[in-house]
Amino acid sequence: MARIVMKFGGTSMAGIERIRSVANRVKREWAAGNEVAVVVSAMSGETDRLVGFCREASPLYDPQEYDVVVSAGEQITSGLLAIALQAVGVPARSWLGWQLPIRTSDGHASARIGEIETAGVLGAMANREVAVIPGFQGLAAGERVTTLGRGGSDTSAVAMAAALKADRCDIYTDVDGVYTTDPRIVPRARKLKRVTYEEMLELASVGAKVLQTRSVGLAMKENVRVQVLSSFVDDDAPAADTLPGTMIVGEEEVEAMERQLITGIAHDKNEAKITLTSVPDKPGAVASVFAPLADANINVDMIVQNIAHSTGSTDVTFTVPSSDLARSLDVLSRAKAEIGFESLVHDTRVAKISVVGVGMRSHAGVASKMFTTLGERGINIQAITTSEIKVSVLIHEDETELAVRVLHTAYGLDAEDVAG
């Protein structure tokens, strides 16, 4: 007998027939004698619909009320799945984030999980009842509903697996594993059998949509074994632990012969570039730019500070998630007198391209090959960031697919044939 957390994404929950299919999948694990908890996302497209309502009501919406609205999607699917499980003879109960509760910080729309009280769920599982838990939501101090940010159901699932001391966390999604890049752009992309926590963390942070960044970081911290599987397989398919998905594991579990210089190429068009012109070139000036953004819980990614002008000023360029652009511009405009910049310029037609691999630690020339390959195709680089196992560049969004294809080939990641 194993204790398993199963997570199903929005496409898996998109309609009653798919929810019934999920119920049958869960029943098989339950019937095998396993203790099962299920974490669900909202129906595909539902969160976007709810976010749209918030933006229509006010572009500068109250994040607390935003959480009240968008958390409704997961509440609906958790209840529906519990009903579908009961219909096929599986005892099931939904547990909302406030009922467990899942305690979080008060960073509305981007809350972080602090503690999960598991006594109720463990008791239910011991009595052979399946616990169905809505992802994405939690409870802050003051008993206010919070949400974990887009893709937060992955984090909910990993956190539940850690709190329940589960044997594994199976993430069912609309892809059958982690690939060297997006197969829709590069048909010769290869599926990876294993990816290290660090590589997956970098891939997720720079645009790979398979798992949310925070979920991977939490899995690495808590040593939760995560398996990425396709939810679109026949009902009579083999058990999850025998399906050929991708395992997210510690580096020690990846055999030396499986390691490559570069593991994958990721891209992200959900970036916006902001430039503040003529910022005073003096100590503390840059801090005055980013402190108010941090206070507003806005994450800043790439940062470039140009050489100071002869006038004693400089330009500062950085990127933020495109969803945070309106709030970023508002925050910076209100802090203009304190910062002392001359003008505020923004550009949403940008994309971030990244190459990731633990092999970078022991090989030189990765960045050079990236810059040379892009340069030979006439692709201009607007900004650069690096880490120990990642190099990222900012380019014009129209050149995204070309950049991904040429880099995938340059680093030898193309499969020998499309089927492979």
Image (cartoon, rainbow, N blue to C red):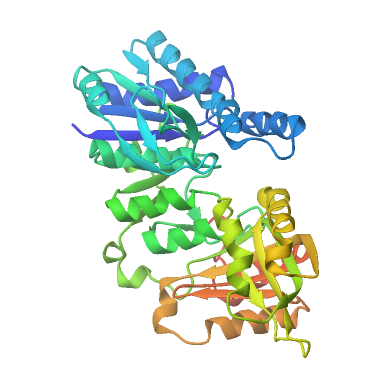
419 w.r.t. 378: above or below = above
Q: Position of residue 93 (x, y in %)?
A: 35, 16
The quadrant holding residue 414 is bottom right
Could you tell whether 318 is left or right of 345 in the image?
left
* Residue 307 found in image quarter: bottom right
Front one among 323 and 155: 323
Give residue 192's position: percent from left, percent from top: 44, 58
Would you say residue 372 is visible in this rendering?
A: yes
Q: Residue furthest bottom?
A: 310
Q: How many numbered markers are drawn?
A: 0
Residue 238 visible within the image: no
| Residue 402, above or below 223 | below
Quarter where residue 49 is shown: top right
Q: Position of residue 394 (x, y in %)?
A: 68, 69
Residue 43: image location, x then y, percent: 58, 27
The residue most toward the front is: 337
Which of 127 and 193 lies nearest the eye of the viewer? 127
Which residue is located at x 54 percent, y 28 percent? 71
Quadrant including the N terminus: top left
Identified at 78% across, 61% down, the residue is 347
Residue at image x 65%, y 75%? 304
Say which residue appears at 26% left-offset and 65% top-offset.
252
> Taking 44 as reference, is 157 left or right?
left
Nearer to me, 317 or 263: 317
Instruction: Using the image, determine if residue 375 lies above or below residue 133.
Output: below
In the image: residue 76, left or right of residue 274: left
